[in-house]
Image (spheres, rainbow, N blue to C red):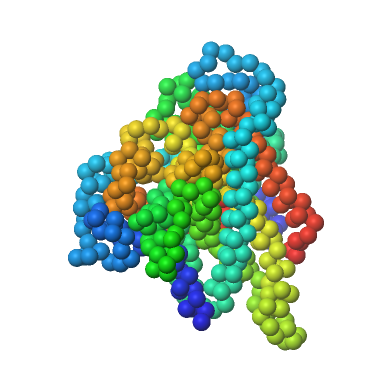
Amino acid sequence: MSETMALARPRLGAGGEALAGLMLCLPATLAYLLLLLLPTLAAVLLAFTDYELGAPALAWIGLGNFEELLGDQGFRIALRNTLVYVSIVAPVSIAGALALALLIEAAARGRALFRAVFFLPVVSLPVAMATAWQYLLHPTIGPVNAVLAQFGVAGPAWLTSSDTVLLSLAFIGIWEAIGFNLVLFLAGLTAIPRELHQAAEVDGVTSAWERFRLVTWPLLGPTTLFVVTITMIRAVRVFDSVAVLTQGGPNRASEVLLYTMYTEGFTFFRLGYSAAITLVFLAIVLALMLLQTKVLDKRVHYG
Amino acid sequence: MRLLFLAALGLLFLMPYLWMISASLKPLDEIFRASLDLWPEGGGTLRNYARVLEHVPVLQYLWNGVVVCAGILFFQLLFAVPAGYAIAKLHFPGRDLLFGAVMLGLLVPYHVPALPLYVGFSALGMLNTYAALIAPSVISVFAIFLFRQFFKSLPDELIHAARIDGMGELSIVWRVILPNALPAATAFAIFSVVAHWNDLFWPLIVVSGADRATPALGVLTFRSEEAGDDFGALMAASVIMTAPLVLAFLLAQRRFVEGIATTGLKG
């Protein structure tokens, strides 16, 4: 069989194949160079200049922008807020999604329905849902505070008080992220053979918690690592809810990296400075990816 | 017990939707009474929707969303499918370099090239055009990566048979490879449309005014310029703009979930 196939194998001539390969890649290569590689390199270079949109000239100022960043109160707040946001959204949405996935996977009934319900925020227009949250969290007419009032609690001004605004945004972020993580965990759980759980039970591991600790958790390792990285990267990119609901306010209490980059670049047109913020953002994303690769190499290899 | 808990939590998750729809059907004075009745008194009113349709070019926004998403997806496939095929199945000089470039591209969030791209479109006088909305997304290294992985698993015999039939490489790509790669193409299409329909960042940068605004930008503009505290109208606008993708999701749940699960990689 294989021999007849080999005989009949119609090869393009080596030159023909090389030409065909290059031609097929040509459109993608041109678009890649023009729309991805060049602009990315330009952004890197821009970060070392004082370029402002509309300015007649630009000058190379070396690390000037980065020095300014170090002393810039607004940037420091944005960086800190972003890290706080990530450190709330990531753990809660990951642990929550894992718990939900285990619950949903535990029995067949309602599986598709619940998966759909929790997944709904992922496909819903974030800008529109942010406005819905604004209504829900409205200090005087919002249902959330109306419910709190029933219990005699005076609810805070969730999105307009600097004490609660970041927490409120993080809550919305969790609501958006959980369904996405849930789907990834469900896919990971389905890949674990059921026989392993049965085998563990036969071996005397009777408590569900022990079976989770000994079988599910280690085998879910690669999925979990992946979910952790992707959730953190997505959380670092928080932008929509801030742009719609708070514009970084009140008093910079919800200023985050990408929003600062946006206002510096497209409101104040300080493109060089904005590019420097972009590079900080890129460095964080790359560090997270590097972390994933490192951990992946070392720890979670179960095939 | 399990079902009860999941149902309670699920209901909590749906609260934004329920209140959004409820408020969109209530007259303004009822909203401001902050009653906890989800069901509008007297069965509700469609006045909010009428107001939105009167003051907001809803159809224009939705149409812009469709044009932008379709345009982006068309070019993404046009560029990525042949390249994915070539990198997966053909030997040619520079192949490894190209694949390396793809892997490198995967590391860069789309916010990074945004500044220079904006300067470019601005210099070309192309702000507020479909081209400016579409062009930066037409190259998806993620699509090339995804298709390359998928095409690698297709049997070589498929291609050999097509060559015996005298097909050229280009028609092999579109008439043999793509039909066999529909699961990957569907997954990618769903990922792409969801991402770009929902995107706010780039439209906010290159578009001002209603002519080319996408649904996300439309809701934002309506909120800041027209509606103010008119939550009824605001919720009605949100319902209208959210509905298309949510309905598509409800009709094709499985595909959506699978699509996002297989493409989860890129986020």
Asked whether, in this view, residue A203 is left or right of residue A98, the answer is right
Question: Which residue is at 68% across, 66% downward?
Answer: A220
Answer whether residue A56 is visible to the viewer in this image. yes
Q: Nearer the viewer, residue B117 or B9?
A: B9
Question: Which residue is at 59% across, 40% downward?
Answer: A78
Q: Quadrant of residue B168?
A: top right
Answer whether residue A14 is visible to the viewer in this image. no
Question: Which residue is at 31% across, 63% downward?
Answer: B35
Count of numbered badges drawn on the protein: 0
- Compared to residue A215, the image places residue A12 above or below, namely above
What x and y, as percent, mark residue B21? 32, 59
- Compared to residue A64, the image places residue B258 above or below, namely below
What x and y, as percent, mark residue A168? 50, 54
- Compared to residue B111, the image places residue B40 above or below, namely below
What x and y, as percent, mark residue B135? 48, 33
What x and y, as percent, mark residue B164? 57, 47
Question: Which residue is at 59% across, 50% downward?
Answer: A85
Q: Nearer the viewer, residue B73 or A264?
A: A264
The furthest residue to the right: A298
Asked whether, in this view, residue B64 is left or right of residue B202, the answer is left
Q: Nearer the viewer, residue A12 or A46?
A: A46
Q: Nearer the viewer, residue B255 or A40?
A: A40
Q: Quadrant of residue A177?
A: bottom right
